[in-house]
Amino acid sequence: MSAPCYHPFPNTHWSLVRRAGKPTSEARRAAMTTLLTRYEPALKSYLRIVRRLGDESDDILQAFVADSLLEREMLRHANEGRGKFRTFLLTCLNHFVASWYRTAKAKSTASLGGTLATDEPTPSAQIEAIWARTLIQDVITAMREHCLTEKRNDIWTVFEGRMLAEFFENQPPISYETLAAQLGLRSPTQAANLLVTAKRLYARMLRVAVNEYEHDEANIEAEIADLQNTLAAG
């Protein structure tokens, strides 16, 4: 049997969250349906992969949706000014999981694969790391396609040899001398200058990706800093 596939959390559209959190109405029901369609795969993979729950994860998720999202109208308390929606959602889910297992009188943390939540759980750092890696990988893929389209294989080759080799493959970076010879450049300095260009392109594309779900300038800077800290911690 193949390992379960991780589904990253989707980009947050706060207007949708606000509609789903309003008092009962036709618009609320439609927004809630859309929200659940988008977030259920990520929540399910979180329970199975990060929390390492078994077949009971489906029952827990269904109960969480029915109890917390629908009956208790949890989304009324979601606030854009208080932080990321996925953090809010995971905090509530972790509380629910802890309550679920307390009610079921779980005898040991073994029933949760060693990850039983405490009375005041915090969202797992693992999910933030997965989110960060997924987003960064999307940016890197987009950057590679951009370089190929613009016929700037030189930029991609230097970026891949200097940055990706070290930070994502745990390999020593390729020397500027080797890259210069590989690309037919006049000197290693030209290869170093290409890396500066590559870093600028990467930073610009990362900013575009973050801007898809964070529209405030200050939030964009904070999110990029969070991504960097998360990857460094991982």
Image (cartoon, helix red, strand yellow):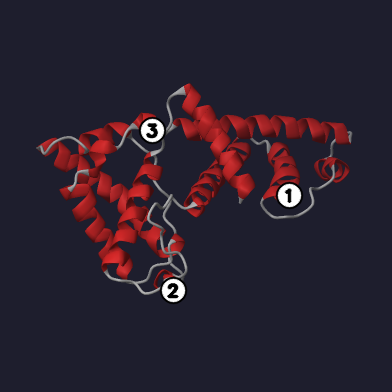
Residue ID for mark 3: 82
The type of residue carrying mark 1 is Glu
Instruction: Give the x, y percent position of residue 68.
Output: 23, 50
Task: Give the quadrant of the N terminus.
Answer: bottom left
Q: Residue at x 64, y 45 (%)?
A: 232
Instruction: Count all numbered tags in the image, as a single digit.
Output: 3
Secondary structure beneath disc 1?
Answer: helix
Disc with the residue nearer the chain's start (3 vs 2)? 3
User: Is residue 41 shown above or below 196?
Assistant: below
Q: Which mark is residue 5?
A: none
Residue 146: where, in percent of width, then height?
58, 37
Q: Earlier in the sequence, mark 3 or mark 1?
A: 3
Amino acid, disc 2: Ala
The answer to whether residue 145 is seen in the rendering is no
Quick check: can you spot residue 134? yes
Contact (Cβ within 8 Å) of mark 1 with mark 2: no
Q: Are marks 3 and 2 in contact (CB under 8 Å)?
A: no
Q: Mark 2, residues whose alpha carbon is within 10 Å: few (<14), some, or many (≥20)?
A: few
Dot label at residue 166: 1
- x 32%, y 66%: residue: 101
* 162 vs 155, nearest the viewer: 162
Q: Which residue is mark 2?
A: 110
Alpha carbon distance from label 3 to label 1: 35 Å
Few, some or many C-alpha atoms within 10 Å of disc 1 (few <14, some 14-19, many ≥20)? some
User: The residue tagged with tag 2: helix, strand or loop?
Assistant: helix
Q: Is residue 218 left or right of residue 24?
A: right
**Residue 92 coordinates in the image, percent (x, y):** 33, 49
Image-quadrant location for residue 23: top left
| Separation of marks 1 and 2 at Cα, in angstroms | 37 Å
52 displayed left or right of 20: right
